[in-house]
Amino acid sequence: MAFPLHRVALAACLCLLACRPDTTRPHQGPPPAPACGDGFVDPGEECDGENLGTATCESLGFDTGTVSCDAECKRVTAACVKHCGDGTVDLGEQCDDKAGPLDCPTFGAKRCTAACAIDDSHCVTQPFAPAPALQLAKGGPAIIADLSPTGFGDLVVAVPSYLRLETFPYTVAQGFVAGRKLSFGSVPVAALAGDLDGDGQVDLAGLNADGTVDRYRYLPASNSFTPERYPAPDGGFVCPAAAWVGVMRGPGAAADDLVALGCATATSPPTAQALLVYRAGATATVPIQLPHLGILAAALGDVDGDGLADLAFVDGTAPELNWLRAEPPGFAAGTPLPLPATPSALAAGDLGGDGKLCLAVIEGPNVKVLENTGAAFVERAAFAQTGAIGLQLLDADLDGRLDVVWLDGDTLRVRRNAGNFAFTAYDATTGQGTPLSLAAGDVDGDGDPDFAATYGQGADATVTYLVLNKVR
């Protein structure tokens, strides 16, 4: 019996379906947790294998190079290069750190920014500006110190007529205004500032007319100064202080020491017979006295390049720089260095930028700059003056080089160090009177040194002319 064709076809299809293998997938568990090494940048990963996402050296702040990925899925930028900050002026940079055309042709200094661009906003043509003067019926020589509260500077005046030190904080609106009156029953003739007890606060010291020295320690808890007398030596060589030399700090010391000339003669010009070092600490200690003969001038400076302040001085015996090498806890004599002539005042510092101590001196009618050759001092520059006082070396224009500064009559003299012992003159008129002192310090809190020139006017009256530095 014949079967219909459509039934034959249906049977064939059913047979084929019955013979196909079972392709149904078994039931799957949850997908594996993300892991470093799976090629996917999962949460908590910066990269994975060759998958760096969108990170490139440029997007990460570098200039060129290739980013890679470590075994912990962290970016590796060791092969990235950042030209800005390497000290070399590369293509597209105006400067890099201290490299580049950063010299200011007028006064001040150019700066290289973090983006290797030149900032010339501190390169000025008018470096100095007068500020309100301070008139005192009873006054004296002055210094500038940043007393608490810090920020603006304070003028500190020794007032012998009133047996005290007086402080005058600076204000933008009025200049110096009346502050504290510090009395110890002494007759202070000169003030000095430093951290004299190691607590991080600025203290004051007064050198008195009778040769004694007082210290005025600042006490933060009471916002006051307490006076203390430096004790006299117990027997032996006794020498009254005659003039300040400066402030120094020994290696590892927490507080500043004071240095003064002592045992002044009545000769003309006067000479001193000793250097006095007043050791600091929580309690004032006995001064170290270093006898010598006929000291005409002294300064602090690192003569031997060991990083410690030495005591340098000249006397009338020979044209040479004598010095006492710092050998903690004391001093030892160093080999004298010849000078071209005997000066009447000196200031010491690295004027050549080579790490060697150079000198600025007052010699007769001139201020001179002497270079240290290692074997002697030789003259490199001379500036005519009529009555210089207050000679000092400091970075007046903030270009990293020490400048020469002094007071000459009614004029503040600044000789800007342009390098290689070349100097450019900048002067500022102060005012009339008999010059008593020249002080330098940051009065207006902008980071550059300002100047206070104090003059006598009559028996006890003084006027202090303030000259603000406009570099910043």
Image (cartoon, rainbow, N blue to C red):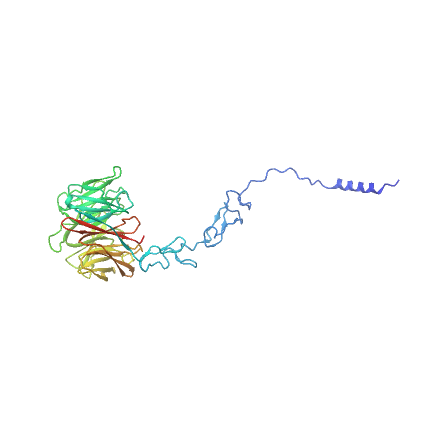
Note whether 381 is above or below 60 in the view shown.
below
* Residue at the extreme right: 1
21 on left or right of 246: right
Q: Quadrant location of residue 180? A: top left
Q: Is residue 106 visible in the rendered structure shown here? A: yes
* Residue at the extreme left: 266
- Residue drawn at point x = 28 percent, y = 59 percent: 417
186 or 464, nearer to the observer = 464
Q: Is residue 244 visible in the rendered structure shown here? A: no
46 or 303, nearer to the observer = 46
Give the image location of residue 401, x and y in percent.
29, 56
Give the image location of residue 124, x and y in percent.
32, 56
- Residue drawn at point x = 73 percent, y = 42 percent: 20
5 or 234, nearer to the observer = 5
User: Where is the N terminus found, in terms of image quarters?
Assistant: top right
201 or 414, nearer to the observer = 414
Give the image location of residue 108, x and y in percent.
31, 56
Give the image location of residue 18, x and y in percent.
75, 40
Q: Quadrant location of residue 286? A: top left
Count of all numbered marks drawn on residues in the image: 0
Q: Quadrant location of residue 4? A: top right
